[in-house]
Image (tube, grey):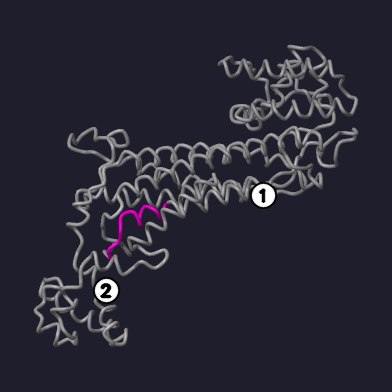
Amino acid sequence: MAKKDGKKMMWDGRFDCGMAQSMIDLSFSLDFDKELLEEDIQGSLGHGKGLVESGVLSKADYAKISKGLKSILADIRAGKNLWLPTDEDVHMAVERVLTERIGDLGKKIHTGRSRNDQVSTDFKLYMRHRATEIRALVVELQKTVLAVSKKNFGKLMPGYTHLQQAQPILFSHYLMSLFFALSRDVKRLDNFLQLHVELPLGSGAMAGSAFPYQRSLVAKELGFERPSANSIDAVSHRDMALEFLSDLAIIANTLSRYAEDFVIWSSSEFGYLNLSDAFSSGSSMMPQKKNPDSMELIRGKSGRTLGNFSALFTLVKGAPLSYSRDLQEDKQPVFDSVHTVNVILRVMNEAIATAKWNFENMEDRMLPALLATDLADILVEDGIPFRDAHRIVGSLVGEAAKLGKQFTDLPDEEWAAKGVPNPKSVKKRLTFAYSVSKRNIEGGTGLNSVKEEFKKAETILKKE
């Protein structure tokens, strides 16, 4: 056991001995929660203004405290190491350094607050800041997607279901699906930022501060709309972190699905996509290899974000009210997901912008079977009920498969025998361009429809 005079803690007045080293190893969190430094300084500056209004600090005292806190932040930004092995967490470390720099006045900054409401405030500030930054990255990716889609407008490719060729589509239609999925991510982050606007400071440990603390003033100072309505709620719940992790996991999951497609498209069997060398890697053994590692890593790292969400959900589901030390473990999942989503958004953005899309390969690999639905539609237009048309086309495709042919290669006589009227006329209409042209319904893959997608996307981006 460590002796009391060997490792003093700011809260150790009631204890006869210091912490065991094993307990220090278990409970100290500075190695990861130092990521909250900027928010901790910001929160303390706002808290200090509240203490001035309540008469705990004079304006001169606050000026000195403010200067000391800002000097700590400046030193850390400059790369200086101010921390000691005895620093329990970033909040206590900042208070220790502040007190060393400005004397006993530094001990007054914690008046009227607990680490519970201090940490909740810092954490909320952190998540709001990072949500704003990630939102901006999502919008940048949207801009890239729109630019690449417009640049390659009119290019055809096979659309897939079940990884089997399904119907002809425009490449732009495929890529714009990412744009609109990302639009919902932006809305989710906006909802997140609009919902979590209450200031925890002033809640104390769980029952509220005993000082006439100007919470509304502090809330405005720190960018919150209002103080929290209930002190137990403010320090207990982590639904904000759960929602943030959910939003990040959804973003990562979306990127993972497109990354999976791009990995497949990069294979020699497909050859639809060449990623820039800057977003690829080689093999330590096979000199010919160019691997789509950027996409594989996006696909892999997305799993971490789901794991982080699950970890936090498991953590809080059984935590009693109002505060237990379990909740210290709420930050690492959030920090990790923030870093993960930040980097995969940047990589996806740059990889799409610099990729070479091989449209000749896409068109060369388009099978006539892609037109089977269009043939059924033509038969319906000629008066044949859809289920009968479906059966006729299916029998043609099945017969062609037995012969190792495409159904379009079967002779006109065979088409007629299966129930297709005017086979020659029908075959002339049955082209990939025709297929796309028939789908100008809103949201479809037709040329006019995709142009409308561009307009909707531009309207969305103008509001950003």
Q: How many marks?
A: 2
Q: Residue at x 26, y 73 (%)?
A: 374
Q: Nearer the viewer, mark 1 or mark 2?
A: 2
> Viewed as shown, does residue 263 lie left or right of 310?
left
Which residue is nearer to you in this view: 237 or 222?
222
Amino acid marked by disc 1 = Asp
Position in image of residue 292 (x %, y %): 30, 42
Give the vertical position of 228 relative to 112 (above or below).
below
For mark 1, what is the residue? 239
Position in image of residue 394 (x %, y %): 23, 79
Badge 2, how many Cα within 10 Å: few under 14, some, many 20+?
many
> Viewed as shown, does residue 84 lie left or right of 375?
right
Residue 210 position by quadrant:
top right
Which residue is nearer to you in this view: 67 or 1?
67
Q: Residue at x 46, y 55 (%)?
A: 456
The part of the chain drawn in magenta is 166-178
For mark 2, what is the residue? 374
